[in-house]
Image (cartoon, grey):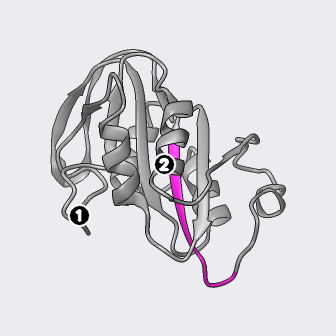
């Protein structure tokens, strides 16, 4: 979950300039190369702008991270469930969705998203349990220990404020 304290115009790479209202943004993505290293990169302030999320994170703060481990790529399924939550508004067409048919992997909420309801919807759809990462420090050596290491497993990440 990502918290954007004030609305602002933001250039998102080739997607161009978009006016983002203040609020909470939930981004879903997969960490094919390993969750700890992906999260460490997202939490760093100094980095080459590569993914769409990098542009947003220059201006906004990560407030919460939720994740799941498993053999399946879940980001598109999570995205559908997020879009059906109360207060959800799709944000920036194409954001984080260049490798799938989703319109965007970024969802905006004016108030704190109902993640308890999201978790309940995952359970109802027989999707893997999600976990909240409590330590949000890019220098943390605990990321590797905090996140279960399961070789050969797909990892999906839900970033939210």
- Is residue 161 in sight in this rendering? no
Q: Residue at image x 76%, y 50%?
A: 139
Task: Give the residue at mark 1.
Answer: 98
Q: Position of residue 84 (x, y in %)?
A: 31, 36
SS state under label 1: loop
Q: Position of residue 22 (x, y in %)?
A: 36, 17
Residue 31 in the figure: left or right of residue 129: left
Q: Residue at image x 61%, y 71%?
A: 34
N-term-proximal mark, 2 vs 1 = 1
Of labels 2 and 1, the one closer to you: 2
Task: Give the residue at mark 2.
Answer: 124
Q: Is residue 40 above or below residue 24?
A: below
Q: Residue at image x 31%, y 29%?
A: 88
Badge 1: few (under 14), some or many (20 or more) residues near its Cα, within 10 Å?
A: few
Q: Quadrant of residue 111?
A: top left
Depth check, front residue: 145 or 125: 125
Quarter of the rendering occupied by the C terminus: top right
Residues at badges 2 and 1 in contact (C-beta under 8 Å)?
Answer: no
> Would you say residue 156 sits in the magenta stretch?
yes
SS state under label 2: helix
Label ID, residue 54: none
Q: Which residues are magenta?
A: 151-159
Distance from label 2 to label 1 (Cα)? 28 Å
Q: Quadrant of residue 141?
A: bottom right
User: Magenta segment, principal secondary structure?
Assistant: strand
């Amino acid at each position: 979950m990502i918290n954007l304290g004030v609305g602002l115009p933001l250039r998102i790479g080739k997607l161009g300039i978009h006016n983002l209202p203040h609020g909470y943004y939930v981004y879903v993505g997969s960490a094919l190369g390993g969750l700890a290293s992906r999260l460490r990169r997202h939490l760093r302030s100094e980095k080459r702008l590569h993914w769409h999320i990098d542009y947003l994170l220059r201006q906004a703060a990560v407030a919460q991270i939720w994740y799941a481990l498993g053999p399946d790529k879940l980001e598109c399924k999570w995205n559908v469930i997020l879009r059906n939550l109360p207060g959800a508004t799709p944000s920036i067409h194409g954001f984080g969705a260049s490798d799938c048919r989703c319109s965007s992997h970024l969802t905006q909420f004016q108030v704190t998203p109902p993640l308890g309801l999201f978790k309940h919807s995952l359970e109802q759809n027989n999707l893997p349990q999600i976990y909240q990462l409590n330590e949000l420090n890019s220098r943390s050596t605990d990321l590797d220990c905090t996140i279960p290491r399961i070789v050969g497993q797909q990892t999906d990440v839900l970033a939210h404020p």
